[in-house]
Amino acid sequence: MEDVKDVYISPLPDSPYVKPFRLNYTQNGKKKNWDLLEVHDSVAIIVFNVTRRRMIFVKQFRPAIYFNSIQPDDRHKPIDTEKYPASLGIALEMCAGIIDKKLSIEEIAKEEVLEECGYDVRLEDLHKITSYRSGVGVQGSLQTFFYCEVTDDMKTEQGGGVDDEIIEVVEMTIPQIEQMINSPGPICSPPSCLFALMWFLHYKADKYRK
Amino acid sequence: MEDVKDVYISPLPDSPYVKPFRLNYTQNGKKKNWDLLEVHDSVAIIVFNVTRRRMIFVKQFRPAIYFNSIQPDDRHKPIDTEKYPASLGIALEMCAGIIDKKLSIEEIAKEEVLEECGYDVRLEDLHKITSYRSGVGVQGSLQTFFYCEVTDDMKTEQGGGVDDEIIEVVEMTIPQIEQMINSPGPICSPPSCLFALMWFLHYKADKYRK
């Protein structure tokens, strides 16, 4: 995963992934505008293995995090991967996926848990907790958050994603999660993952402490 | 705040706010690329008023959330604001701001608490909790999260932002926060706010329950 080289930026072509545009509006009689992106809604799933009392995460190289770890003066030339190793961009995340198929959000969540983490869960194992907006600046898509308990015997595949995805499945104990949350950072995770972990620590973890 | 009309989208001009580009790289010998944005790092502050035991939030109209609340078929024509009222885009957030000045992050956090919430806090009132990546997809900037307790006598200004900002200061009790977090959603807040609230509920709230 950490074998990353020949890194450089180039202008955005007509991209299927990032489609920026301007939203114009008049608020309280004043003309305003805001630049933003159209982004798919998504699901995110906390997967907790109750057999071994471990949280299941996925780890992958995230170009946006890697790029933002580079000093601004060094960003606009070929990136020195000795000075900036790929590990800077490897994020610890919840299992998640975008809603881009005509399936229910539970079915999409079930697919992601199998593809990314390797656990074959039933739809009724997925408990919807809540949903929220993924950001307030340039992307305001809806993310629905599920909690899912799994056991060792549900692990039918290796996980790690499909196609070109290079995803590593990682497990953490409850004390390891608490240690991460209480570290000064930078934590290489997004706030949705930290919200999910705090939700778990507050509402679920006591049941699984030894 | 909710008087919003004449809403329509247009192509992105050369924008000072949204600068998309492509990051090219070779991972495990395979050429890849990822489209992303350059975004400022930021600070976010939980402000808790210990005099009245209330959390201080800011509310504002967020175009990216509003746009994503609109059915896809209705997005690419002038928006019907009867069908889609502005309230869909009004987000409840922590006090926050981008790091775009040559000040320490504590000084920027202090400025934001005064401008947005109206509380004049000292630098030593700002307790850094941790920092994390604001997203994993198109923006991976660093957000540093502070906890700040305030008292009524620190409220020296009205708050509500500067210049064109239309920001409302909102207060919630601890039971109101718990009710929001435990609602099925959609919660019109970003995950950073929900992380901060769960952190507060787990590590701080007990001290302030009656």
Image (tube, coloured by chain):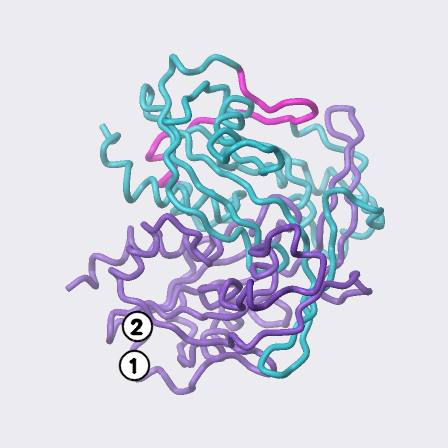
Chain colours: A cyan, B purple
**Circle 1 sits in a helix, a strand or a loop, which is it?**
helix
* Residue B176 placement: quadrant: bottom left
Residue A210 forms part of the magenta stretch: no
What range is drawn magenta here? A158-179
* Residue B127 placement: quadrant: bottom left
Q: Are marks 1 and 2 on the same chain?
A: yes
Position in image of residue B70 (x %, y %): 59, 56
Check disc 1 and give the amino acid type. Asp
In the rendered image, which residue does mark 2 sit on? B49
Q: For label 2, count other residues whose C-alpha is less than 10 Å away and answer few (under 14), some (14-19) or many (20+).
A: many
Above or below residue B58? Residue A11 is: above
Q: Is residue A93 left or right of residue A125?
A: right
The residue depicted at 38 percent of the width and 30 percent of the height is A148
Residue A166 forms part of the magenta stretch: yes
Q: Are marks 1 and 2 in contact (CB under 8 Å)?
A: yes
Query: Which badge, 1 or 2, comes first in the chain's sequence?
Result: 2
Q: Residue furthest left?
A: B210
Check disc 2 and give the amino acid type. Asn
